[in-house]
Image (spheres, helix red, strand yellow):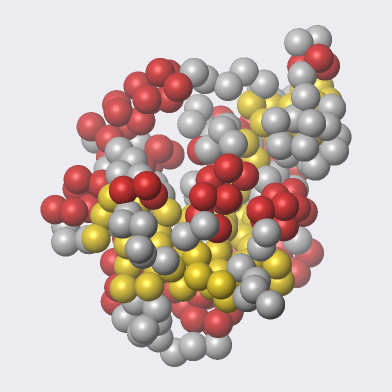
Amino acid sequence: LIVESRRCAFCRGNLSGVWLGSSFCRCVGCGLIARTHLPSDAELYELYAEAWDEPSEHAAETGSMDDHLARQYVLGLLSTHGRTDLRGLRLLDFGAGTGALAAALEHAGADVYAVEPYGHRGLVDAGHNAFASLEDVPESVSFDGVITMDVAEHLPRPWEDFARLYGRIRPGGWICVSTPNPSGLSARVSRAKWREAGKTSHLVFLSETTLARMLRSTGFASISPARWHVRYGRGLQHELAQRLLNLTGLQGASRLIAYKPIAS
Ligand SMILES: [Zn+2]
């Protein structure tokens, strides 16, 4: 009943009741799925501080990207942009976790900046160009591309972060956003038991449609899905299933590439 009186913080649409029997509600206007009771800033701080004490034990908060997956994502980026390497590109890994993707991007030749609020010290120690927040990156630095993988679901108001990132991308540059897909097969089948909905630090879920709408409202254009064929190394059958899900839009991730228009 509390939910019925609430409005979507993004589009002011009505939030309908419980989504798939979970602790989330869904906006009738934009499709945003948000935790019915958002944890307070203090609760979130405590959650992340505890997780970063032992990062490998808390992959939901600190990032579950390993070197293999990071290399697969770089291959996906290369195929999307029709390139063989990332040389000459200054890229930002926003929400870099324990640094696997930043390392893979560097390996492919990019000049990589990493932002990670809680774990940036470890990234600096590992030799990365890392910062605790976007505001700490010198103002003179602008990016050819921003990658933010499995981060948006942790943000209470991701559209505000997209706007801040937009301001740091050069005209003609791009953003790649990947986040769990609430319209995917796994969410539809598992409903309230969906693995992603069970993680306390996951606050919002964005379908491809909702994410595209959010990026468009920020100013991004030429928005398209990046349904890469990621090899998880779990056998041929698993790989064929992933390809089928990609074709039908039922894949596990909402992953879009969007461009900042070149001012006319
Ligand atoms: Zn909405």
Within the image, what quadrant is residue 53 found in? Answer: top left
The residue drawn where x is 30% and y is 44% is 132
Quarter in which the N terminus is drawn: top right
Q: In terms of depth relative to the viewer, which is nearer, 74 or 15?
A: 15
Label tally: 0
Above or below, comparing residue 247 to residue 26 in the picture:
below
| Quadrant location of the C terminus in the rendered image | bottom right
Residue 40: where, in percent of width, then height?
49, 18
Up-down: is 262 above or below 25?
Answer: below
* Image: 197 above or below 184: above
Residue extending furthest toward the front: 264
Residue 22 picture location, percent across and down? 69, 26
Q: Nearer the viewer, residue 237 or 232?
A: 232
Left or right: 105 as drawn, with respect to 229: left
Q: Is residue 183 left or right of residue 100?
A: right
Q: Is residue 231 visible?
A: no
Seen from this angle, which residue lies furthest left? 125
Q: Can residue 201 be seen by looking at this rendering?
A: yes
Q: Nearer the viewer, residue 139 or 129?
A: 139
At horizontal 80% and vertical 42% (from top left) the residue drawn is: 30
**Residue 82: horizontal and vertical position, in percent?**
55, 88
Residue 133 in picture, x, y percent from top left: 35, 45
Q: Residue at x 42, y 54 (%)?
A: 94
Q: Residue furthest top?
A: 1
